[in-house]
């Protein structure tokens, strides 16, 4: 081999070693990803139960036809963080009377419960089909009033 070829080979050797190392690192990364390995997770945040009722007036709480159209059993309740991030959703339960009738109208309470909600300083409750958000400092016994009460 001539002197020029030996010099070329010496310069190519470090380049080939670096290239081989990069290819090996890429293969290891692909193999780890294929095995389902994940990055370590951050410590889990404390979770709480968010619950309450949506109150409306109706002639008969047991008759869904007398409830406002936007407030029916099964209506979606969205729980929000102070930033507006959705923390979860729940559905309204069956309406029950929350007190004696007044002027032929009853206050009806439709319960909701959402578990595993990250602890927040405020919880926003938004009801599908109803404008606005009700904010609460507590996670339990939240009351959202829709419409006028008797």
Image (cartoon, rainbow, N blue to C red):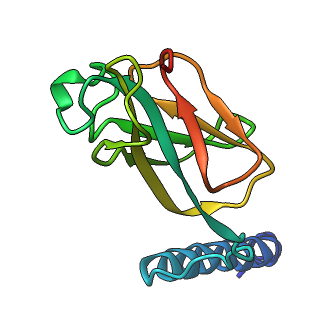
Q: From the viewer's perspective, tell me whether residue 82 is left or right of residue 61.
A: right
Considering only vertical position in the picture, is 59 above or below 26?
above
Compared with residue 84, is residue 141 higher up or lower down, i.e. above or below? below
Residue in front for this viewpoint, 45 or 69: 69
Q: Is residue 97 left or right of residue 36?
A: left
Relative depth, front residue between 150 and 44: 150
Residue at left 35%, top 44%? 92
Name the spot of residue 133 as percent of width and height, x first. Answer: 61, 26
Query: Residue 68 location in percent, x, y?
Result: 31, 19
Q: Give whichever of 99, 12 is nearer the camera.
A: 99
Res. 103 image quadrant: top left
Residue 80 appears in which quarter of the rendering?
top right
- Which residue is at a point 72% across and 80% down the rendered structure image? 17
Count of picture labels:
0
Residue 95 image offset from top left, x and y in percent: 31, 42
Q: The N terminus lies in which quarter of the figure?
A: bottom right
Residue 136 place in picture, x, y as percent: 71, 41
């Amino acid at each position: 081999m001539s002197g020029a070829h030996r010099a070329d080979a010496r310069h190519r050797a470090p380049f080939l070693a670096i290239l081989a190392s990069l290819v090996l690192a890429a293969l290891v990364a692909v193999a780890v990803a294929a095995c389902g390995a994940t990055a370590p997770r951050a410590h889990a945040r404390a979770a709480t139960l968010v619950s309450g009722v949506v109150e409306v007036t109706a002639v008969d709480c047991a008759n869904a036809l007398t409830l406002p159209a936007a407030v029916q059993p099964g209506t979606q309740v969205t729980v929000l963080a102070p930033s507006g991030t959705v923390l979860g959703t729940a559905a309204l339960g069956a309406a029950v009377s929350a007190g004696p009738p007044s002027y032929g109208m009853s206050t009806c309470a439709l319960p909701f419960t959402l578990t595993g909600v990250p602890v927040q300083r405020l919880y926003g409750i938004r009801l599908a089909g109803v404008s606005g958000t009700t904010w609460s400092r507590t996670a339990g016994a939240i009351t959202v009033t829709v419409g006028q009460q008797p």
